[in-house]
Amino acid sequence: MTTSSGSGEDSLIARYFKPLAIDPGAFGLVDDAAILKTSGEDIVVKTDAIVEGVHFLPDDPPETVARKALRVNLSDLAAKGADPAGFVLTLALRRAEDAWLAPFARALGEDAAQFRCPLLGGDTVSTPGPMMISIAALGRVPAGKMVPRSGAKAGDRVIVSGTIGDASLGLDILKEGAAAAALAGDAAAREMLIARYRIPQPRNALALALREHASAAMDVSDGLAGDFSKLCAASGVSARIDLPCIPLSAATAGLLERGIASMAALISAGDDYEIVCTVPEARCADFAEAARQAGVAVTSIGTILAGSEAPRFLDEQGRELALKVLSYSHF
Amino acid sequence: MTTSSGSGEDSLIARYFKPLAIDPGAFGLVDDAAILKTSGEDIVVKTDAIVEGVHFLPDDPPETVARKALRVNLSDLAAKGADPAGFVLTLALRRAEDAWLAPFARALGEDAAQFRCPLLGGDTVSTPGPMMISIAALGRVPAGKMVPRSGAKAGDRVIVSGTIGDASLGLDILKEGAAAAALAGDAAAREMLIARYRIPQPRNALALALREHASAAMDVSDGLAGDFSKLCAASGVSARIDLPCIPLSAATAGLLERGIASMAALISAGDDYEIVCTVPEARCADFAEAARQAGVAVTSIGTILAGSEAPRFLDEQGRELALKVLSYSHF
């Protein structure tokens, strides 16, 4: 985090980010670049950025902004079956404010330690615009073992981790939408949903199970319906998804029942950071057991079908849900 | 470049960036992440961002913005003795405009091909603020062979590539400063200096020579004086730099002679993207020959001394140049 910097940036980096650079390959952030040692494995590379006002709210706590910035990338590594190896950070700030940077760096360091994904380097730049945090995360998989989007086969089960739709309702609450009013008397539910928006729970514990058993996987970041449609397109298959099987938290299920949330919205909204994968029928029991050992809830929601049409999402009467907007788009 | 995207972003990516994803590890940008194959070498990781209004001007051509975004990172890989392996891109845009994106992507693809640094993936996000392009570049060096900042030893020669200070005068011309008026009649000099600001010439051809012969190296991006002082600090050494030896282009030397530029400003200004390195006396002839074969001009400008004081910059009378601002700082 040193080469595009002068003394002001250098002291900022030294104060807040050097303590995070505990990996020997980071050289304490005093060199121009970092090193990742290898031994024949594949390095998985992923970059995702979050922008103030787009991916997080201006008054989100710096701690949750830091965690979200790293975790959206960890989620992709998990989906690919990769173990985190380290990350580099680009931080575009209007000002270098201790009151914001100190908790940001502390939370980032905690997550880096928890997910064993050390800070390797970065760049801090000033911008007159909104804050932006761009992270490039590196992971390791045994050679040839990355779980692709393109491996789903007819007959595979479709499996999703965690619960779907919570984050979109958390955002709705933060924006004082209908969910906020509906949950006015339930602080615990409100807080859970907000936390699901602000602090993704990347499923890195599932990486080994995925690379051992899944035929295809991706993380669900822009809505289950749209993201899973991309997986089907990449695999050249279709699918049938049973909407009643989609795992929902109690809070989200309650809002769905009361008509505050709709299934179409829940499966088209972003920020889930769960994993959708396909597993051959014969591997499903082993996958379920591996997921149980990893401590990650997984739910079977449908079946891969031969064909090139978009996957169909069917309600309990077998009627197809009409989806207008499959996923969030930035443009 | 797919996971944080919806249909608008997807078609933008398909149109402009898929043609650049020619590396098999990029999976044509249709997967969530990219793969870098390894075989025991070290992977060098570097990230640098450029921001509109800070690192490039709003009316800089999209082609030069693209080249600068990639080349500032290539310059770091070169300084570390690493061969480019690939890069990921974060593009924060106000709008997705064909008139800007088409030439941007074309130039980026040309540079990726020229420097053998393929696009591996990325993320495109919308921002209401200034454009920002953040690139994380990956390189390869034989295990343990990265050229550090910290290896300079007393007695080593200090060597710099190319010429120093041109880019700062190019920026001055673009801002209608004194250099613009002084060179009103010399379009060729003006264009050369502007090109030095807009299109860095990373010295990747020098990577092999550096890892074979240099004891320490870094790229000069924030001013020779400040950057070289950091190298000395990291190495625990001092140095004597002979200002008359610092390589200048004819245009810059002319402006210096006429008092339009000062040596203090030239060695404190940013955007050179040259390499400063230290080479043991006994390896200097071999290094010079390797640089000649690589087609990169290199110049010996001083000597590493024992001690912990900041390096001294001496004029032809042996007087020390007083430097107030060693380098550019973002904060």
Image: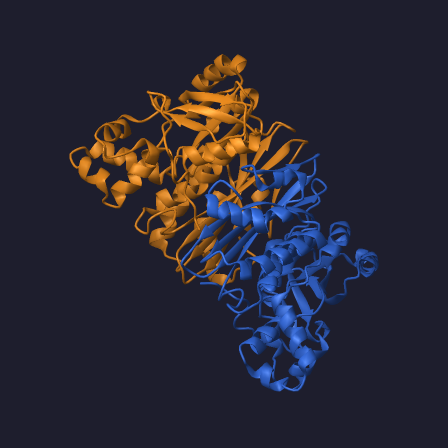
Chain colours: A blue, B orange
How many badges with numbers are in the image? 0
Identify the residue shown where x is 75% and y is 66%.
A300
Residue A69 visible from this viewpoint: no
| Residue B273 image point, x, y percent | 42, 34
Q: Compared with residue B262, is residue A29 higher up or lower down, i.e. above or below?
A: below
Residue B244 visible from this viewpoint: yes
Which one is nearer the viewer's eye here, B152 or A303? B152
- Tell me if A236 is positioned left or right of B57 in this view: right
| Residue B282 image point, x, y percent | 54, 12
Which image quadrant for residue B193?
top left
Which one is nearer the viewer's eye here, B156 or A191? B156
Q: Compared with residue B198, is residue B306 higher up or lower down, i.e. above or below?
A: above
| Residue A282 image point, x, y percent | 81, 56
Which one is nearer the viewer's eye here, A133 or B104? A133
Identify the residue shown where x is 33% and y is 49%.
B57
Which image quadrant for residue B221?
top left
Outermost residue toward the left? B185
Which image quadrant for residue B295?
top left
Q: Compared with residue B181, is residue B290 higher up or lower down, i.e. above or below?
A: above
Identify the residue shown where x is 66% and y is 70%.
A164
- Tell me if B31 is positioned left or right of B76 in this view: right
| Residue A2 image point, x, y percent | 51, 42
